[in-house]
Image: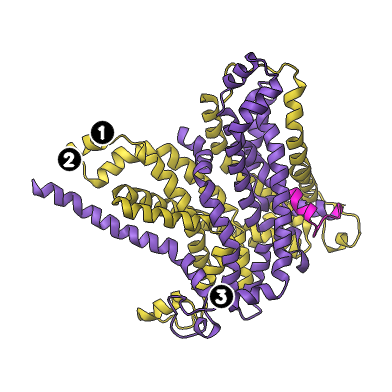
Chain colours: A yellow, B purple
């Protein structure tokens, strides 16, 4: 990124001084809590400590408790499943919309793009409340429509059953995430040269073959990065689950990692155990993020 | 030769129809939010939905404004968001200058750290951030929330601004220096004006992030009178009370309007920054 003629720092304290505020802010608000969290995860830090008793060092006990806790594994499994289903659905729908946009007439494409932008721009909380209203048991449009089509959904409460709870959560998450994928993949597809597509067409390649042989290889790098980002984002989903839990009243059967940490620590006061789960979550994120960071850095070195 | 052209037209019609469905799915919830916010209670609570707001009412908005809780939350949200944007933008601007105008030891490790920090999930750290703010007696304060918000917005802000700074060729500054400007003057008169669109776009994006943020707000602002707007909105749909959907939709509309407008204004610029790495792949 740096212009090759940019000077080596004339006085080397200048760039470091410029970095100082950022480094200090990140150290105070992220670095310090991180080291403290590692400490917390090795401590007994429950309600008694909240009321002033000094925390007790218990070594790996929090971790041992967690590893042997079947509920944690349930939550982890649930989080991974939710993450994969949501990321896969978002990628599939987003890519399909991007391909469709290539085929549409221009006015319809502009309409679709404005719709996607609208959905993308909506604040999380506003989207959440609207979808709750659409899925409302008594006066929601979804139940009204389903009843119209003859399904037995009169007064169906979507948020009480774990499976239908996660269905609503998935609808909200996917609705909010598709625009980013659709726009990014569409941008990548427009880079594919028209000559290549025409050549494939002349060689008798059908729509599916053109997608597989021409478009897919060209869009591969973008698809990989976007898919990775979706997995990372969907693993840490908190807001949607938390708000729907508050609305539906069911928490134990619907907790994912984020809400579990929250309810364990800030809700239940067991900060030691919550910190241990959080460390686990961070480790999981590092594993998932490593390839993304590597890709970004190689792009950085190329330029 | 009519055969191939009909074959080509058919997918186009199908794609257009599918496009209309996509548009409907995207836009209907937003339309429904605004529509419901303008309907009187008896039409919201009726067996069949009312599809348009004509002959509607502003009563829902009046109910939102009447309690005072909305304005408390608006004040907190504005304070925290503006403080976050100002601080993050200033810090990030300085850091972006350092990274894109100088080569120095530690530059690469700073960039790597930035990328890593950007990917840290809030959920993985909010427990100890809560404990830290508790010790500092900053829970339920705008200062406390701003502190954690700045750290959340900062990595992305540095990353994007860096791109904007690098986009202004250093040669321009050199030319100004040849013409007799000092290094500082050259920067101020040549580079800074060219950077301002980038600064505005990045600031607006940070504003949207902080304005919409929910997770850290739940953790830090536990007291009712300290709620930000997203928190204020979330209490409406609590399981233990009957939901006043008219007011919820009015509140949602009010929160969404500035964000949607801002977002539409800057998204083109930001998407380029967001996916720059991806496209280069």
The residue to which callout 3 is attached is: A160
Q: Foreground: A52 or A296? A: A296
- The answer to whether the residue labelled 3 contacts the one labelled 1, judged by CB atoms less than 8 Å apart, is no
Give the letter of the chain under mark 3.
A
In x, y percent, where is residue A233? 56, 50
In x, y percent, where is residue A210? 26, 42
Crowd rating for badge 3 (residues with CA inside 10 Å; few <14, some 14–19, many 20+): some
Task: Name above or below for residue A213 compared with residue B13.
Answer: above
Q: Residue at x 25, y 33 (%)?
A: A195
Give the letter of the chain under mark 1.
A
In the visual, does A67 lie left or right of B138? left
Q: Is residue A114 magenta?
A: no
| Tag nearer the camera, 3 or 2 | 2
The residue to which callout 2 is attached is: A204
Secondary element under disc 2, as helix, strand or loop, is: loop
Task: Name above or below for residue B195 compared with residue B42.
Answer: above
Q: Foreground: B2 or A243? A: B2
Secondary element under disc 1, as helix, strand or loop, is: helix
Q: CA distance from mark 3 to mark 1?
A: 54 Å
In the visual, does A113 lie left or right of B270? left
User: First in sequence: mark 1 or mark 2?
Assistant: 1
The residue to which callout 1 is attached is: A195
In x, y percent, where is residue B275? 50, 39
Q: CA distance from mark 3 to mark 2?
A: 53 Å
Secondary element under disc 3, as helix, strand or loop, is: loop
Crowd rating for badge 2 (residues with CA inside 10 Å; few <14, some 14–19, many 20+): few
Asked if labels 1 and 2 share a chain, the reply is yes
| Tag nearer the camera, 3 or 1 | 1
User: First in sequence: mark 3 or mark 1?
Assistant: 3
């Amino acid at each position: 990124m740096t212009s090759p003629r940019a000077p080596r720092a004339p006085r080397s304290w200048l760039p470091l001084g410029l970095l100082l505020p950022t480094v200090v802010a990140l150290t105070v608000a992220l670095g310090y809590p991180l080291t403290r969290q590692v400490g917390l995860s090795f401590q007994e830090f429950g309600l008694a400590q909240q009321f002033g008793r000094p925390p007790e060092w218990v070594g790996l006990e929090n971790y041992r408790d967690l590893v042997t806790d079947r509920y944690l594994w349930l939550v982890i499994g649930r989080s991974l499943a939710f993450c994969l289903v949501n990321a896969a659905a978002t990628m599939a729908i987003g890519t399909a919309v991007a391909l469709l946009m290539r085929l549409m007439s221009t006015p319809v494409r502009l309409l679709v793009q404005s719709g996607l932008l609208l959905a993308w721009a909506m604040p999380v909380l506003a989207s959440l409340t609207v979808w709750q209203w659409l899925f409302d048991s008594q006066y929601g449009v979804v139940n009204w429509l389903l009843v119209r089509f003859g399904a037995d959904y009169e007064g169906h409460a979507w948020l009480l059953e774990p499976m239908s709870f996660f269905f609503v959560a998935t609808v909200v998450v996917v609705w909010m995430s598709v625009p980013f994928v659709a726009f990014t993949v569409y941008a990548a597809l427009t880079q594919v040269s028209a000559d290549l597509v025409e050549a494939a067409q002349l060689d008798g390649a059908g729509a599916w073959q053109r997608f597989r042989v021409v478009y897919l290889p060209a869009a591969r790098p973008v698809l990989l990065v976007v898919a990775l980002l979706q997995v990372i984002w969907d693993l840490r989903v908190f807001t949607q689950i938390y708000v729907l839990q508050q609305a539906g009243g069911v928490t134990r059967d619907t907790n994912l990692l984020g809400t579990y940490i929250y309810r364990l620590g800030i809700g239940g006061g067991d900060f030691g155990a919550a910190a241990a789960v959080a460390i686990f979550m961070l480790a999981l994120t590092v594993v998932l993020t490593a390839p993304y960071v590597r890709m970004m850095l190689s792009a950085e070195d190329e330029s | 030769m009519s055969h191939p052209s009909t074959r080509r037209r058919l997918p186009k019609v199908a794609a257009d129809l599918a496009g209309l469905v996509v548009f409907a799915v995207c836009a209907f919830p937003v339309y429904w939010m605004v529509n419901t916010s303008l309907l009187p209670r008896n039409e919201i609570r009726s067996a069949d939905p009312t599809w348009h707001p004509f002959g509607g009412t502003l009563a829902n908005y009046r109910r939102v404004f009447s309690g005072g809780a909305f304005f408390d939350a608006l004040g907190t949200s504005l304070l925290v968001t503006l403080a976050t944007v100002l601080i993050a933008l200033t810090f990030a601007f300085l850091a972006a200058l350092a990274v894109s105008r100088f080569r120095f030891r530690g530059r690469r490790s700073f960039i790597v750290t930035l990328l890593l920090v950007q990917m840290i999930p809030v959920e993985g750290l909010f427990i100890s951030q809560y404990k830290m703010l508790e010790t500092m007696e900053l829970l339920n304060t705008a200062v406390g929330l701003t502190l954690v918000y700045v750290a959340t917005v900062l990595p992305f802000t540095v990353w994007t601004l860096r791109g904007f700074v690098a986009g202004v060729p250093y040669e321009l500054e050199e030319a100004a220096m040849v013409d007799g400007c000092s290094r500082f003057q050259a920067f101020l008169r040549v580079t800074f004006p060219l950077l301002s669109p980038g600064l505005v776009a990045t600031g607006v994006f940070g504003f949207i992030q902080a304005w919409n943020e929910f997770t850290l707000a739940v953790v830090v602002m536990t007291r009712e009178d300290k709620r930000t707007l997203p928190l204020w909105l979330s209490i409406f749909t609590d399981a233990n009370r009957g939901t006043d959907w008219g007011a919820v939709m009015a509140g949602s509309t009010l929160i969404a309007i500035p964000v949607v407008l801002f977002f539409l204004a800057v998204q083109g610029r930001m998407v380029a920054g967001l996916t720059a790495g991806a496209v280069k792949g």
